[in-house]
Amino acid sequence: MHLQKISLSHFKSYEYQSFKFSERINCIVGENGTGKTNLLDAIYFLALTKSSTSNQDALSINHGAEYMMIEGSFLMLGVHNSMRSTLRLVDDNIDVEDNTLSQPISNAEHQKSNTEHLITISLQRGQKKAVLRDKKAYERISEHIGRFPVVMLSPNDTDIIRDGSEERRKFFDGVMAQLDSEYLENLLQYNRLLLQRNSLLKQFSERNYTDNLLLDVYSDSLVEISLKLYQARDKFITEFLLIFKKHYTTLSNAREEVEMIYESEVGAENFAHIFRKNRQRDLAAQRTTIGSHKDDFIFEINGFTLRKFGSQGQQKSFVIALKLAQFEMLTKAKGFPPLLLLDDIFDKLDDRRIQQLITMMVDGTFSQVFITDARPERTRQLLDNLGVEVTYFEIGK
């Protein structure tokens, strides 16, 4: 999969601008404040129908404009190409006895096996967001998630470690949403029910009246979906942890042991009973105080909490390993590598970690990469002699 081109209209700092991208490494360079990260965010928005920096879509509309639009063309490689790519890039342990994948494909076969998709996302102030694939609107926007997978590494990613449980849930929900459409639908339904139940609890408090039968309807549904989310998260973290540890060991040269512990009240054997007994507390708090929205993922290093005892370098390695594990899981699930977005990483990582990422760009682990940097000369020094196609985009000139 490659993003061939993108056109922006009134998206953040852009009025009207178009870009055609290389299939390999795309370097977006320019001074700070010129819109490098905004271009990366537009690519992220095109893939996931939302910004990487804000939960409010309206903030993506250029100041003074009434609408914004992003349009991009994805080229999806056919089965022969994607199978070759997956076998070569992801799993070094695969032994292919059948050599049919190594046979050359004619140009006619190659053209037939590739498909181009035009994605259009538009938003008018005060109206709902529209997402179209090949000029046809999705029945549900959630159907778009995971079709064009993306992984983003940015300077703020250490918030996953340093901030509260919400940031960690957001990360893992984002990974799982691209992998599993059923999980995404359950998560969206859970959030809707949670909002409705909380609104009901607030109304009951304000009116000094409780309709227990009505509350039961929301409570029972919330418990049912909580159990589904718990089972999915518990199963996922087991697989994810193995891949994550492999990448962390490489990044840290096996100097320390890391662990990841999924904590959830939903895992209790009698969770439905506990949830019901918690009703008076919920009524007093005017919100739902237990459930999947309170789950957390505890990160440890050498048996201690990473947030409190991990060094800055250890935390950076942990975050990169999280993103590399996400990248590998998406590649295995989809059969092709996702887009990789690297925002301002050269300023935030030491030389050793940068070199490891560059090595992965060169050896084919990553397919299409987008990098932002405020110092073009540094980027050229790092990338120009690698023997890989590199295209530069100078923003603000």
Image: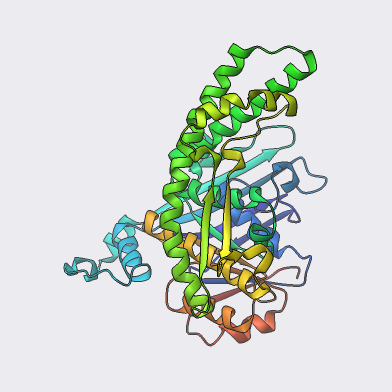
Q: Is residue 153 left or right of residue 135?
A: right
- Report whether residue 193 is seen: yes
Q: Quadrant of residue 101?
A: bottom left
Q: Is residue 139 left or right of residue 77?
A: right
Between 247 and 119, the one lying in front of the other is 247
65 is higher (above) or lower (below) than 20:
above
Q: Is residue 96 left or right of residue 258?
A: left
Residue 133: x, y in percent? Answer: 49, 42
Residue for point 56% across, 38% down = 292
Q: Image quadrant for the N terminus?
A: bottom left
Residue 349: x, y in percent? Answer: 64, 76
Q: Quadrant of residue 318?
A: bottom right
Residue at the limit of the structure toward the left, as seen here: 98
Residue at the limit of the structure toward the right, as seen here: 64
- Report whether residue 71 is seen: no
94 is higher (above) or lower (below) than 233:
below
Between 389 and 335, the one lying in front of the other is 335
Residue 21: x, y in percent? Answer: 55, 65
Residue for point 64% across, 24% down = 279
93 is higher (above) or lower (below) than 208:
below
Residue 17: x, y in percent? Answer: 68, 58
